[in-house]
Image (cartoon, rainbow, N blue to C red):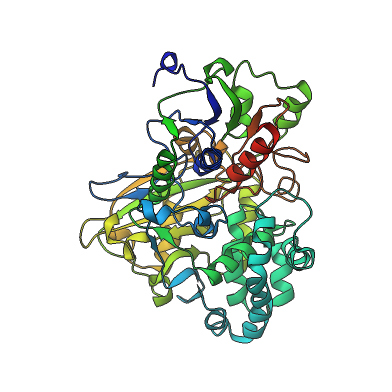
Amino acid sequence: MGKDKIKEKYDAVIVGSGANGISAAIYLQQKGLKTLILEKNSEPGGATRSGQLTLPGFVHDIGSAVLPMSYSSPFFKTLPLEKYGLEWIFPEIAFAQTLEDAEAVGCYQDISKTAATLGKDKEAYEDLMNPLVSNWTKIDEDILSPFGIPSQPLQFLKFGIKAILPAKTLINHYFKEDKAKSLFYGAAAHSTLPLTNLASSSFGLVLSIMAHINGWPFPKHGASAIIKSLLAYYKDLGGTLYCNYTVKDAKDIPNSKIQLMDLTPRQLLKIEGLNLSNTYRKRLSKFTYGSGVFKIDWALNDPIPFNSDICRRAGTVHIGYGSEEIEHSEALSAKGEIAKNPYILLVQPSIFDSSRAPEGKHTAWAYCHVPNGSTFDCTEIIEDQIEKAAPGFKKSILKRATMNTRELEIFNPNLVGGDINGGKQDITQLFTRPVAKISPYKTSIDNIYLCSSSTPPGGGVHGMAGFNAAKQAFQDHF
């Protein structure tokens, strides 16, 4: 779309068409505003896109794949996305964790069923998870909102006391055996933080809670299905999307009362002509990014031949052989090194969704954490780790497609240095992203707001950052 063709005036312009940008636009469109989304790429969706990366007929999730936070999103729950074609698939086992000696343990939706596989830690796991799961719907909106006074202070405090702990402290307090420790570590490692860091428990807790409430579902036909349904609803509301539209200068943004940026601080600072205050610019420039990822997509001749039946029945498999190995891997990537035996997050959607591959064939997707900006090729170490749990895996590979951190950033500039969470989510930036402000979405310009995963509640395909920012902007200006 040529810039010279946009002559209309809008109430709100949203730059970026990731889940947060679209969510912001939907909220404002629902409020009766005239909105426009601008997207630099030819296809909307940010990091939530699907495509044929390897061979014809094999559909791969280029970015996000398994979306428990999408299914559980308080904002998405209010939208009629199923009416617009969104179908969810629920693997029996939300996630599995490989162990030593060809064993594995799985996280089922049923807490008791999960706990029953954890040996001496059965009661401890139930004691940890049952109260959190029971109270989740009382605090989920508070957790997915900017830091403030919670609506249920006591329940929020009970969660917060556990969530603030390093994951290592939590597992050593609750568990005696490595099965339970490794299972929790596998979820906590989604944080891309060292598991000895404060607040690394929060990721393991939230993701485990979601597994026990709804499982870890993914959309049929690929992750892009959620973007397609969001956009179909948005357009039915009267919203407009222009792709192939790059915003390099403030003058490139069409006339509008408010502007919401689904961008990280680094992208915002690159826009010429934005009259951000020097103080705000300095604060944004100090925003830090976390570890990156090295990602592989495979076209496979067969399902992954895991030794463990638990792994074969799980949508997501966390690969690491013991809690010490997982902890070591995450510590190294944060220090700028790459483990020889890395923690791996693997997704195998075609086991449950035949639309992902030609008949009888399969797809899989995996990544390991690497230093931010690394261009090291992790193909061999990733495939070697998988082969330990699934002898014969390498023989089933028909073709692979790899993306290092720089290639991921080219695919989506918000993935700075391969950071898939929109910035480091450590104890400081978890609560003060992108800067410490009462309203973190406001920039120093009265009518410009940030609405990306660099704002609360951070990474994940949930749309809550966009919803929160749009709600703030609407209250301020309409």
Residue found 52% across the figure and 82% down from its top: 113
Residue 71 percent coordinates (x, y)? 49, 59
Residue found 59% across the figure and 21% down from its top: 271
74 is higher (above) or lower (below) than 97: above
Query: Which residue is at the front of the view, 261 or 425?
Result: 261
Query: Which residue is at the front of the view, 446 or 362?
Result: 446
Quadrant in which the C terminus is drawn = top right
386 is higher (above) or lower (below) than 246: below
Q: For residue 455, which quarter of the picture?
A: top right
Q: For residue 175, which quarter of the picture?
A: bottom right
190 is higher (above) or lower (below) than 476: below
Q: Find the residue positioned furthest to the front.
A: 32
Residue 454 in sight here: no
Residue 131 percent coordinates (x, y)? 68, 75
204 horizontally vs 377: left or right: right
Q: Find the residue positioned furthest to the left.
A: 359
Residue found 79% across the figure and 63% down from its top: 153
Quadrant in which the N terminus is drawn = top left
Q: For residue 288, which quarter of the picture?
A: top right
